Amino acid sequence: MGKEKGKTEWIKGKTALQHSLGLGAVPNVIPPGEARLDGELRLVEIGWHPVAGMGGKWLAEQSGLGKMITKNIGTYPDPTQHWAVLVGDFVHQLWMDEDLDVIYNNEKLEREQWRTFEVGKTRFTDEALRQAAVMTIYKMRQERAAYNIISNNCQNFAVRLLDAIQVGAHHQFATSFAVYQAATGDGTIKDLFVDAHPEEQKIDPAEPSGIQRTDTVQNAQHVMDENTTKLDNHSSWFKRGNSSSSK
């Protein structure tokens, strides 16, 4: 009886903590609008903020980070440091459902909560960005649904989304999105294969004037590498937590 009660209380506590972290789908905040790839150029940023307190510790434990660290197989990005893609008034991010499978959500940008870095530009409208992000998560889930500290995390999502929406990548995105549409029946991007700015495909250092394709992904990867805490076998509280739990 006591064992069953303890299990029930543990489940209640876990559920409360999941809710405090905000796990699960949230309402879309992107306003209705045309999904276009030929809008006005807009700044693309990446940003991070911490997942604080016990919620962050629980997330680290659930992602298996502690076990990885004790096996001494390398360094990993801190799962309590959350990254997202910021364009205009909105944040596009990978998050998790209650089973820790990856999902997409968006929210209004409250700039004071984020440390931000400029990485490029895009012509995607807000609705096109939303659809590109949904496609990105769909492709990640096809490969692996569960959140993973190495290969299925918020940084991986940010890089994939940036690769899709960067200036000069129209044809590659259109091809990928057409495959996604055929598989799912989703997506309403207008004039998908009409490239209104073919000149942006080129990279010509001899002609620096005008808009050219820039490596937004490389910029972002450099920023995240420079600004993400790496955890390894010297992260003492994880080692303590693992050793105590295994006794």
Image (tube, rainbow, N blue to C red):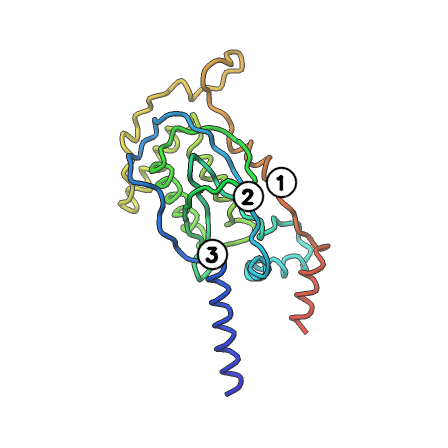
The residue carrying pointer 1 sits among few (fewer than 14), some (14 to 19) or many (20 or more) residues within 10 Å by Cα, namely few
Mark 2: which secondary structure? strand
Position of residue 92 relative to residue 68, above or below, is above
Name which of mark 3 and mark 2 comes first in the sequence: 2
Name which of mark 1 and mark 3 comes first in the sequence: 3
Position of residue 125 relative to residue 74, above or below, is above
Q: CB atoms at circles 1 and 2 under 8 Å apart? A: yes
Disc 2 designates what residue? 48
Q: How far apart, in angstroms, are the residues tagged by discs 1 and 3?
A: 25 Å
Camera-nearest residue between 72 and 91: 91
Q: How far apart, in angstroms, are the residues tagged by discs 1 and 2?
A: 9 Å
Residue 213 image position (x, y, % from top left): 46, 23
Using the rendered view, name the quadrant where residue 179 is placed: top left
User: Which label sits in the foreground, 3 or 2?
Assistant: 2
Q: CB atoms at circles 3 and 2 under 8 Å apart? A: no
- Give the numbered dot on residue 172: none
Q: Residue at x 53, y 40 (%)?
A: 47
Q: How far apart, in angstroms, are the residues tagged by discs 3 and 2?
A: 21 Å
Q: Residue at x 51, y 28 (%)?
A: 215
Camera-nearest residue between 42 and 97: 42
Name which of mark 1 and mark 2 comes first in the sequence: 2
User: Which label sits in the foreground, 1 or 2?
Assistant: 2
Query: What amino acid type is highlighted by mark number 2?
Result: Trp
Disc 3 designates what residue? 146
Camera-nearest residue between 72 and 227: 227
Q: Is residue 108 left or right of residue 117?
A: left
Disc 1 designates what residue? 227
